[in-house]
Image: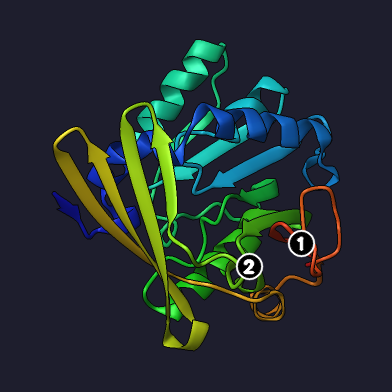
Amino acid sequence: MTHTGGFQDDDFWIEFYDFLFSEQRYTQAGELLDTSPLLSFPAGARVLDLCCGPGVFTVPLALRGIEVTGVDRSAALLERGRKRAADAGVAPRFTEADVLEYRAEGRYDVVLNMFTSFGYFEDPADNARVLRTMHDSLVPGGTLVLDVAGKELLARKVVPPKVVQRGDDLMVQTDTVLDDWARLRSDWVLVRGERVTRASLVWFVYSAVELRAMVREAGFGEVEVYGGFDGRPYDQDAERLLVRAVRTA
């Protein structure tokens, strides 16, 4: 079986769910909300978790008393998020919408886009449009936190192939650099018994300089770059590429 629809294909998310959204990832999200200075939000803050998937951050934010809305185009992932929220005894708002069509003018104090959920549109103009949506969804003075795997970090680990085993299931991920480091393709092979599933994702990757420039072009007045959720500099010891930006007008 082969999936080529990538992030727009619900079958892909269902098939690879256990590898993409492990319990460890949910635990990590909660720990980050408790410890990261970049994810410290005041009581009563209205948070938009854009491209929220199954609510990895949406649910723990709700558990912490934050008014949070999770938006994603995948009905399958949103259903997982709703179930997880119900099991946890909270009721964040989940909205099924294409990020290119979603509109919430000046509604939120914070916009989150986490775990490299940015850059997947084939047309670069659409990725820039997503940043403008993030900007326009914020109140003046509101904050964007954007978390991706930076180009500089990916250059250290695109080889060798990554092998992950969960129980009897095995996944192999192979990354290929495209277009002079403009994009990356990830080819995944999942083996479950005698069943083999293949999938491929292609997305744009950004250096800190490139992403900062894009965020400023989207209208943000204050833009800061960090190398981890602990607020470390984006240097040779960076673990992630995080941008925190403020809508100033």
Splitting the image into 4 quarters, where does residue 66 fall?
A: top right
Name which residue lies at 71% across and 74% down: 208
Q: Are marks 2 and 1 in contact (CB under 8 Å)?
A: yes
Element marked by disc 1: loop
Q: 121 or 166, which lies in front?
A: 166
Q: Is residue 211 above or below residue 80?
A: below
User: At which x and y percent is residue 155?
Assistant: 59, 73
The color scheme shown is rainbow
Q: Residues within 10 Å of mark 1 (few under 14, many from 20)?
A: some
Q: Is residue 74 visible?
A: no
User: At which x and y percent is residue 222?
Assistant: 83, 69
Relative horizontal placement of residue 218, taking residue 71 as reference (left or right): right
Checking the image for residue 238, the label placed there is: 1
Distance in Å between CA atoms under marks 2 and 1: 9 Å
Q: Is residue 47 visible?
A: yes
Of the image marks 2 and 1, the number of the one nearer the N terminus: 2
Name which residue lies at 56% across and 37% down: 69
Q: Amino acid at mark 2?
A: Gly
Element marked by disc 2: loop
Q: Quarter of the image containing the C terminus?
A: bottom right
User: At which x and y percent is residue 211?
Assistant: 65, 74
Name which residue lies at 62% across and 69% down: 156
Relative horizontal placement of residue 121, taking residue 225 as reference (left or right): left
Residue ID for mark 2: 150
